[in-house]
Amino acid sequence: MSVERAETAESPERQSPAYLRTSLAAALTLGLSRGLFHRDARLHCINLLLTYPEGCRARCAYCGLSGRRIGPYGSKSFIRVPWPTVPLEDIVERIAIRRDRIRRICLSMIAHARAVEDTKEICSRLRASVDIPVSLLIAPTLVSGKDLEHFRAAGADKIGVAIDLATPELFERHRGSGVGGPHRWEKYWSCLSEALAVFGPGQAGAHLMVGMGETDREMCRAIQRVRDMGGRTHLFSFYPEAGSLMEEVPPPPLGRYRRVQIARYLIDGGTARESAFRYDRTGGVTAFGVPDDMLDRIVGSGEPFRTSGCTGGDGEVACNRPFANSRPGEEIRNYPFSPEPEDLESIRRQLQGGGGTR
């Protein structure tokens, strides 16, 4: 993928709510940058990010926006790509022009004192300007139950909570006291519960990330917990961000990630429960509690290996985040389109391969 050099410098004038950062994929979709998607993938959700000169006060070990990472916030990559800063009015104008290909907008908060109020204002502006559903990826450390009600009143229809880690110990190590960060495990889960109460079952979900030191058993139990609460899991594979504390940590083996993708698909779809799974002595999942012929059909459909994210009005995943978990190439981790026959052959080979807890 090629792209024009993006304007990323921040100044007191270039900040939310008047300005937002857009993902590289969103910038390409909106015509703000030039380039091509690998295999002609298409983004159906415009991902937006609040921006302030002070940046994010969180210090998450794996995040490119971490306050620990050297450099001004506007120059920091996120998910390994630049996020150009664009006036909100320009974003609204371009979304309106390209609305035929856009099925959702996702606005992400950062840990900043003004983030809650600015999120309400921006969400309201987006919904008043274009008839496209808006999701909010919120910062639970800053958010109260009343704020959730205000987000809904502003027009948001779905909420995302980036819990990311599968256990309280890993959360504390990578997002809490282990890095001097403000986030707390209990607050994230309670916020997800409140969001489901305000927005309704299936209208809030958790981001969880494979490859942070957890076992399959721990990750599958976290996915089941989200499902039992009435939520959905948006599954990610860890991929190192340059300049972060975890920049030298490798992503999880593909075979392992594929098995957890299958687990998420079965749990979220209500096809199987984690309690029916079997694991080896290291906590790796070895069986999913469904008949072999059913499992073979599910794998052959390719559906477990597509991006899991917020849906559009048609019920299909809109937030498909092309190549957010890996570089474009042969080893796509979350497919932004239906896997083709050669993809399915690769997936079956990957599932036959090994893969430890990392």
Image (tube, rainbow, N blue to C red):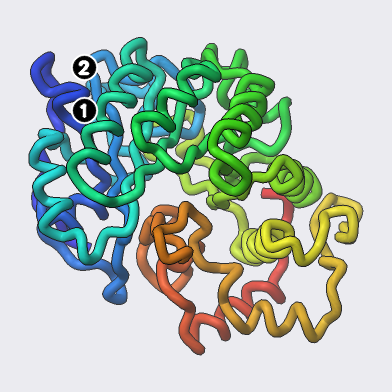
x, y percentage for residue 29?
19, 58
Direction from residue 242 to residue 211 in the image, left or right:
right
Q: Which residue is mark 2?
A: 53
In the image, is residue 221 above or below residue 3?
above
Tell me which residue sits at (31%, 76%) in the image.
39
Q: Residue at x 15, y 60 (%)?
A: 98
Residue type at the position of mark 1:
Gly
Q: Position of residue 314 (x, y in %)?
A: 42, 66
Q: Residues within 10 Å of mark 1 (few under 14, many from 20)?
A: many
Question: Foreground residue, 284 or 52?
Answer: 52
Residue 289 pos. (x, y %): 87, 67
When the figure is inspected, residue 330 is found, relative to residue 137, above or below; the finding is below
Mark 2 vs 1, N-terminal side: 2
Q: Nearer the viewer, residue 216 or 355?
A: 216
Badge 1 element = helix
Which numbered dot is residue 74?
Answer: 1
Where residue 231 sits in the image (x, y, percent)? 64, 45
Q: Which of the 4 image quadrants contains residue 353?
A: bottom right
Residue 120 in view: yes
Q: Quadrant of residue 167?
A: top right
Marks 2/1 in contact by CB < 8 Å: the verdict is yes
Q: Residues within 10 Å of mark 2 (few under 14, many from 20)?
A: some
